[in-house]
Image (spheres, grey):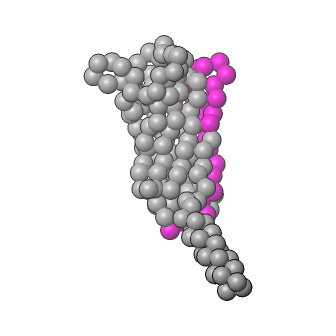
Amino acid sequence: MKKTRLSSTLFAFVLLVLIASCQQPQVFSEKKVFENQIWNRFDFLEYDFLIENSDITYDVSLGFTHLNAYYTDHLTANITFFMPDGSMRSRDYTFKLKNAQLEWLGLNEKGIINHQLSVIEGIKFPEKGNYKIRIESKMPKFNLEHIKTVELIISPSK
């Protein structure tokens, strides 16, 4: 009887260790909300986050939520990565928001459209430490209207 109990306890411990080792590191997610639904051209969005594991790759994406009245079929933004050592990497991105039939590519729930926009897949942050990402609207309108939220999402690559 004692041998069976020891075997059961050992089995439960091994199972617990296996389950814990399969879980992925914490996902970073922060959402900026536009109360007046306007993203001003010079309102830079900044996100600060900590990378604790520089040995794995990450996927960086944006959650972009707007109203059905958003005026165009794309979003152009400059995204700048600031590294712990003081260096930076910057690039302009254009994200397509509508298909060829001019239908929103994102999930449309009662006139609120939510897009998941891939920025970079499989990026390896060069070192552990504090990082910053700045997002700047590069759209020609000074006040980009009908914007609800812009969310930065960083998750371990699958």
Q: Where is residue 36 drawn, in percent x and y?
A: 65, 18
Along the line of sight, the residue nearer the viewer: 90 or 148: 148
Check residue 132 for magenta coloring. no
Q: Which quadrant of the figure contains the N terminus?
A: bottom right
Check residue 38 for magenta coloring. yes
- Tell me if 47 is positioned left or right of 154 in this view: right
In this view, which residue lies farthest toward the top?
69
Quadrant of residue 117 within the rendered picture:
top left
Looking at the image, which residue is at 54% across and 44% down? 153
Number of numbered tags placed on the structure image: 0
Looking at the image, which residue is at 43% across and 28% down? 106
Specify the segment rendered in magenta. Answer: 31-55
- Tell me if 109 is positioned left or right of 8 in this view: left
Along the line of sight, the residue nearer the viewer: 22 or 36: 22
Q: Where is residue 13 drawn, in percent x and y?
A: 65, 74
Work out whether residue 16 can be spotted.
yes
